[in-house]
Amino acid sequence: MTDLTIRHNWSFNEVNDLFNQPLNDLLFMAQSTHRQNFNPNEVQVSTLLSIKTGACKEDCKYCPQSAHYNTGLQKERLIEVQKVIDEAKEAQAAGATRFCMGAAWSNPKDRDLPIIHEMINEVKNMGLETCMTLGMLTKDQAAGLKDAGLDYYNHNLDTSPEYYGEIITTRTYQDRLDTLEHVRDAGMKVCAGGIVGLGEGQKDRIGLLMQLANLPAHPESVPINMLVKVEGTPLENIDDLESFEFIRTIAVARIIMPKSYVRLSAGRTSMNEQMQSMCFFAGANSIFYGEKLLTTDNPETNTDMMLFKKLGITPEKRQDFSDEAQQSALLHAIESHQDSKLFYDATQPRV
């Protein structure tokens, strides 16, 4: 039986031993942990809308939204609230239960926050969980988002502290940790994970997961992104990460953060059905859903549903759905939805 004790004192050697045990043993441990905390045949369905695109002053080497690189990305200002409402309605009709909104900012300006608060309020009133990623936050900004009704805030650590400087120089690792602290102190749930395939070594993947698991509270959501290589970014020609190494990362995340949602996030178009299936077996239980992640492709809606059907997986039900007819209609919409027009942002895989 897997030990379900929630720990925040994982050592490098302990996580290294998990990573490098025989794959069958690792997967068995991860699946056992998963079954003791979640329905193994349900996957949370989330969507992500870019509410402000491009011209970010940060120099994250993976990101086409950075103003430091010429990727041909069209810059867009903060979109109108009605556009967010329309996209959220379409996402809900397509089966999403969480609606995430991302802005390519280093940090939000106070002048933009009233509009952000209105977006949160409108989406939450639709019955969707709300999540935002806006960059770094002050304590007061985090408190304001909480008061507006925000459920989750995303701010990824990206990689290990040791490798971080190879990827980003315009903000520090401590800046990211401080924002997560502000979010937690404000009473919101934390969404924090990272990106693999950045040219890091296994020790850095171990270091990333250690940082997340050793936070004062485990993030409620842990997105694990496979790098999406975009022409014009410094990492466009980086070597691909070996598939089994990605699966091991998912499995270890599940074991050391047993009650967190582990999201199979950016990079799924480079994964065949068998690899995605192994990730679900390793403990991934959340995906982004839709045909486009802003500037890169995401598996088509119907493709995901076909895979779910093959695996006997169903989208997770919201616990606060009181109307069974509404839930049934929602699941039917997921199965039959063929032509989603949602736009997401996985090329800046922060959620």
Image: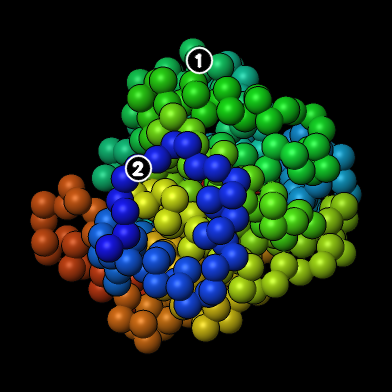
Q: Amino acid at mark 2?
A: Ile
Mark on residue 22?
none
Residue 148 visible in the snapshot: no
Residue displayed at 54% across by 74% down: 22
Residue 100 point in image, percent of width and height = 47, 46
**What amino acid is labelled 1 in the image?**
Lys
Describe the colour scheme in one phrase.
rainbow
Q: Residue furthest top?
A: 140
Eye-nearest disc, 2 or 1 = 2
Q: CA distance from mark 2 to mark 1?
A: 27 Å
Label 1 CA crowd tier, 10 Å (few <14, some 14–19, many 20+): some
Q: Is residue 135 above or below residue 193?
A: above
Residue at (48% x, 33% y) in the render: 215
Foreground residue among 104 and 249: 249
Residue at mark 1: 139
Badge 2 crowding class, 10 Å Cα cut-off, few under 14, some 14 to 19, many 20 or more, is: some
User: Residue 183 or 212: which is nearer the viewer?
Assistant: 212
Mark 2 residue element: loop
Residue found 79% across the figure and 29% down from its top: 170
Identify the residue under disc 2: 6
Q: Element type at marker 1?
A: helix
Q: Is residue 250 above or below residue 350?
A: below
* Rendered location of residue 280, percent (x, y): 43, 70
Query: What quarter of the picture does the N terminus occupy?
Result: bottom left
Does residue 108 show up? yes
The residue positioned 42% from the left and 56% from the top of the image is: 255
Residue 176 location, quadrant: top right
Instruction: Work out which residue is located at the far bottom of the displayed protein and give it.
Output: 310
Point out residue 332 in the picture as x, y percentages from the top left corner.
Answer: 26, 73
Q: Is residue 39 left or right of residue 271?
A: left
Pointer 2 or 1: first along the chain: 2
Q: Where is residue 320 drawn, in percent x and y?
A: 18, 47
